[in-house]
Amino acid sequence: MATIKKHIFTIGIAIIALIVFMYGIKTFYPDPSMDCWSRMPTDSESMCLQENGKWMMQEGPGMKTNGYCDFNDKCNNLREPYSRNVAIIAFVLGLGLLYYGIVGKKIAEQTTAGFVGGGLLVIVYAIIQYWEHIGDTLRFFLVLIIFGLLIWIGNKYKDYFK
């Protein structure tokens, strides 16, 4: 029964580490594209074009206007550098958690294992955060590097995983 409790505790630490990171980013480094989406003028084609939007024609019953303003290009241009920065921060923090979880010898085993799991989850979050903005070749090499890094860590610290 104690082993099950340790595993649940470990999983809990890993998940909470990811949640802390996600809410930390949301709190201290908000997504600028969200502000872009919240200020979308949709009243007229001229307002839309004035705000660098793209007017899309659309007709239907109950519509006040004959179209809507598409801000995908404008808002996505703000999102790409933000996603890159969050991915870099997440990757570095994930590696830090992973490293501390492996070399941290003065804390309980389930806590260090939770840091390892949290580090891996944050690294996965980093990959997902920026995934849509990179090409297939870079995706392949990024995942290959992470895979190689995990194999290297597993071999270098094999005593930890016993």
Image (cartoon, helix red, strand yellow):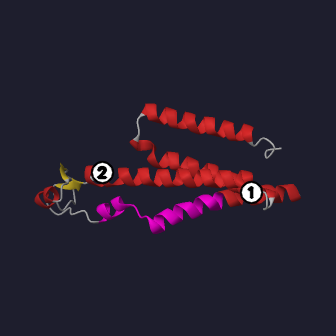
Residue at 73 percent of width and 40 percent of height: 156
Cα–Cα span, label 2 and label 1: 41 Å
Depicted 81 relative to depicted 9: above or below = above
Query: Whole-percent x and y of residue 133?
Result: 39, 43
Are there few (<14), some (14-19), or many (20+) residues within 10 Å of tag 1?
A: some
49 or 78, nearer to the observer: 78
Determine the image quadrant of residue 71.
Answer: bottom left
Residue at 32 percent of width and 51 percent of height: 76
Q: What amino acid is at disc 1? A: Gly
Query: Whole-percent x and y of residue 126?
Result: 52, 49
Drawn side of residue 91 relative to residue 160, left or right: left
Whether the magenta-drawn stretch holds residue 24 is answered as: yes
Drawn side of residue 73 relative to residue 141, left or right: left
Determine the image quadrant of residue 151.
Answer: top right
Whether the magenta-drawn stretch holds residue 88 is answered as: no
Circle 1 is placed at which residue position? Answer: 104
Q: Secondary structure at mark 2?
A: helix
Circle 2 is placed at which residue position? Answer: 77
Depicted 59 relative to depicted 26: above or below = above
Drawn side of residue 89 relative to residue 8, left or right: left
Query: Magenta residues, as a range?
Result: 15-38
Q: Quadrant of the C terminus?
A: top right
Query: Whole-percent x and y of residue 60?
Result: 21, 53
Residue 81, labelled with which disc?
A: none
Depicted 30 relative to depicted 67: above or below = below
Q: What amino acid is at disc 2? A: Asn
Q: Secondary structure at mark 1?
A: loop
Tag 1 or tag 2, which sits nearer the N-term?
2
Are there few (<14), some (14-19), or many (20+) residues within 10 Å of tag 2?
A: few
